[in-house]
Each structure stands twice: as C-alpha cells, then as structure tokens.
Amino acid sequence: MKKAGVALLAVAGVLMFGCGKTQYANVDMPPKRVKVIKDFGEDASKMLLKELKKELKTALKTKGPVGAIEVCSRKAQAITQEVAEEIGDIQIKRTSFKYRNPNNKPDEYEAQALKFFEETLKKTGKLPPYYIQKVDGEYRYYKPLKVQPVCLTCHGDPKHMDPKVVEKLKELYPEDKATGYKVGDFRGVIRVSIPEDVIKKSCL
C-alpha cells in the first residue's frame, strides 16, 4: 500500500469555503471542516475497499468461494488495521446491523448512524452520500455500502447459495446475520474515526 497523503489532500481547496452547516451531520460545523473530514474519510474508505476487493478477487480466483470465505475470515480485520496504520491518526471499522463477524457489531453511535441511513433511504429512496458525527473528542465519518452482484455469493439468499458456502459460513460464523441481501441493498458502513485535534490543525 502507498502512503495516502490524506492530510495534504484534506487541506487542499479548504479555504474557498465559508461558514454554514451540513444536513449529513449530528452537529453544525462550517463547510471547510466538513470538507476536511470528508477528505480524510473518503480516502481511508477507498483505500480499505481497494485492499479488501483485491484480497477477495485473488481468493476467489485461487481458492473458490468456500476458500475465499476462510481467507476473508482471517485477513479482513488485519487489512483494516493495516490501512488505518498506513494513513495514521485514524481508526477504521466496517459495521452493520446484519454483521457477520461479532467484532463488527455496531456500538451505540454507529447504530445511530446506521439508523440515519436506513430512515433517510426509506423516506427519500436514496442513500445519503455520507454522515458525520462528533463523538468524545473525535469526528466519525460514515461511508454507506451497497450490495454488489459478487456479494451475493456469500451474502445472498441461502436457498440460492452454494450449499458448501452455506456450510462454511455456519462453521466460521455460527451467529451470522449477514445473508438475505439483494443487489443494491444497503449493506452497512465504513466508519473512519479522526481525532478532533487532527481536524482542527488541518482547518487552520
């Protein structure tokens, strides 16, 4: 993985914004601060998705769907941590109400964000592009995820999945909640947590 240079990207163009607020946050803040948080969050999210997709693609090609599940169960958390360390000063987590790995169970603030996406989708028919929280000395950026066709291999209707895949999921995740999806469904979020002092320095 290459250095993200997130802080520099986040600062670029910031001074052109004035004061105001965004509807996609739990607290009012000037647009330039929103811009910085979004840049941090988007860069981290895209890097994580790129690494996870690369790992999944390789596993599917070399080991097939059943082997890919086993690879993901061992490597997904490690890859997430590696991306966070590569960027620095942040934490990253994937979470959903229908989680597979218990480590991805949402905390109370993540649950609030997930509800925001679900309720907005229900009311408007569209997913918000992001959501920002200010929580205990940090900003949390949430990027929503949709189910893609390849996801149905192990997240679709178990009745239509390979029986060997279903069996492997039961073995690795006996309390699995992450099946029954259709293409385009709201899957969950990537949460990127950034210390408040990092954002303040970037906004100077």
Image (cartoon, grey):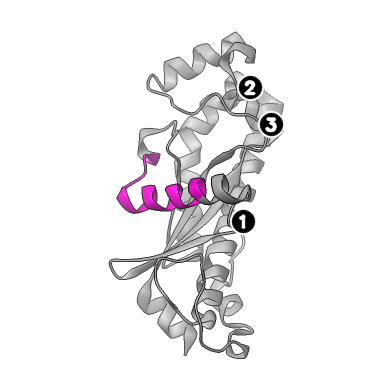
Where is residue 80 shown, x and y percent of the image?
48, 49
Residues rendered magenta in the picture: 104-119
Q: Which SS class for mark 2?
A: helix
Q: What residue does disc 2 label?
A: 65
Q: Are marks 1 and 3 in contact (CB under 8 Å)?
A: no
Instruction: Determine the residue positioned at 60% across, 58% down.
Output: 129
Labels 2 and 1: the sequence-earlier one:
1
The label nearer to you, 2 versus 3, is: 3
Q: Amino acid at mark 1?
A: Lys
Q: Which residue is mark 1?
A: 46
User: Position of 18 compared to 97: left or right?
Assistant: right
Q: Position of residue 109 (x, y in %)?
A: 34, 54
> Where does label 3 land, which residue?
150
The correct choice, above or below, for 27 with respect to 80 in the image is below
Q: Earlier in the sequence, mark 2 or mark 3?
A: 2
Q: Nearer the viewer, residue 48 or 109?
A: 109
Label 1 to label 3, Cα distance in Å? Answer: 18 Å
Residue 74 visible in this rendered orientation of the protein: yes
Q: Is residue 26 above or below residue 120?
A: below
